[in-house]
Amino acid sequence: MTYDNPALTIVSDEVKDGSIRWRSPSNIALVKYWGKHGDQLPQNASVSFTLDGAATDTTLHYAARRSAGEGVEVELFFHGESKPDFTTRTKGFLERLLPIYPFLRQLSLRIDTTNSFPHSAGIASSASGMSALALCLVSLEERLFAPLTDRSEFNRKASYLSRLGSGSACRSVYGTAAVWGRVPDLGESSDEYAVPVGDRLHPVFQSYHDDILLISRTEKAVSSRAGHGLMEHNPYAPTRYAQANRRVVTMLDVLRTGDTERFGELVESEALTLHALMMSSHPYYTLIEPNTLHVINTLQQFRRETGHPVHFTLDAGPNVHLLYPDVVADPVKKFIREHLLHYCEDKMYLADRIGRGPEELAVNETTNA
Ligand code: DP6
């Protein structure tokens, strides 16, 4: 499929200045996307929970450009400060969208963006940031041209555009949980955009918590982009892609039936497999740290002693995400405070949970994020 549309150009004199604002959350992969090909297409399917508190709030201001130039005219402000490096990345992303949105060349854009989580928390902001911007763009298309056929078409297009900015961002467009990548028996699934898990999610998972233990807030040595690239020559890659595709099918079944034990086995194995792939790349590298392993071992002991269904997952970094249902929230939070916080940098963790997905906000509305 293609969204390329040379007809989407504006008559500059008819466009009034305006602003659009979206808040979009981050997500945590349960079955990981690791390895890509072509234009941001995944080597395997992935599933994630959408978070609630960790989010990006983006306002897109637009005005007709005085004289149409070659590229896109944009400036990005992060927490009120002009950011040349973010501006360059965003400009590159918007210019790649010109075949889809040729009108972007005819506008002057200013983007104001803030994250709800501390900048140096070691939390990837590309999923929330790219999805928030993509949602603003699809809203802008609707404002300048015509509404899309329905909500699901709106979300699909926003997910497609998000993917072009950052693969994992395409899953942030939906509340609770999302699947990205072609999955047999999931008719609407695609490598080009994510689809919602929706009512195939058992109630036990709808109350899930994700407490993010901040083991280290140092910028990671190898970016996800570079990590994906190293999968091209990883000897385990073909086996891994087949495994992940099978696991997505199993995970969807687990999410539907509410089996928290099988859920835990799968997410923990996925986390360790992701890091094993980094360790078996050439050149090899490690992103986990000694305290990552201390947390994992202490958690497993707590689980053996209490039987509480609390499991870990990892992103492409040393921080540990603890996933558990609301019924065990009190003992788990006590355990975190008493036994895990001293492994965290500055004793910091972010308490998050499954969220309802992005929301469009009134411009200038303040959020409590
Ligand atoms: C480990 O989506 O950040 O978080 O497409 O290059 O922007 P790019 O990569 P990115 O990779 C995320 C990898 C992961 C697993 C996941 O979210 O599925």
Image (tube, helix red, strand yellow):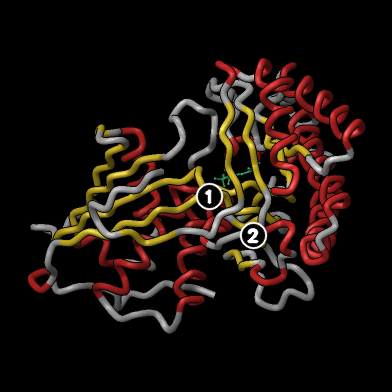
Q: Which residue is at a point 68% across and 17% down the rendered structure image?
A: 343
Q: Which residue is at a point 87% across and 49% down the rendered structure image?
A: 261
Q: Which residue is at a point 10% across and 74% down the rendered structure image?
A: 14
Place of residue 196 in the rendered image (x, y in percent of width and height, measured from the top left): 62, 67
Nearest to N terminus: mark 2 or mark 1 = 1
Mark 1, other Cα within 10 Å: few <14 / some 14–19 / many ≥20: many
Residue 96's disc is none
Q: Does the residue labelled 1 lie within 8 Å of ligand 1?
A: no
Which mark is nearer the camera, 2 or 1? 1
Image quarter of residue 322: top right
Image quarter of residue 345: top right
Mark 2, other Cα within 10 Å: few <14 / some 14–19 / many ≥20: many
Q: Is residue 325 visible?
A: yes
Q: Is mark 2 within 8 Å of ligand 1?
A: no
Place of residue 306 in the rendered image (x, y in percent of width and height, measured from the top left): 88, 35
Residue 52's disc is 1
| Image quarter where ligand 1 lies | top right
From the viewer's side, name the closer residue of 245 and 313.
313
Q: Which residue is at a point 65% across and 50% down the rendered structure image?
A: 36
Q: Is mark 1 on a helix, strand or loop?
A: strand
In the rendered image, the quadrant that contains the C terminus is top left
Q: Name the residue under label 2.
A: 177
Q: Which residue lies furthest to the bottom in this view?
A: 149
Q: Is residue 39 visible?
A: no
Answer with left or right where residue 156 lies relative to residue 84.
right
**Three-letter amino acid code at disc 1?**
Asp
Whether pointer 2 and pointer 1 mark residues with C-beta atoms closer than 8 Å, the reply is no
Answer with left or right where residue 222 lies relative to residue 338.
left
In the rendered image, the quadrant that contains the N terminus is bottom right
**Three-letter amino acid code at disc 2?**
Ala
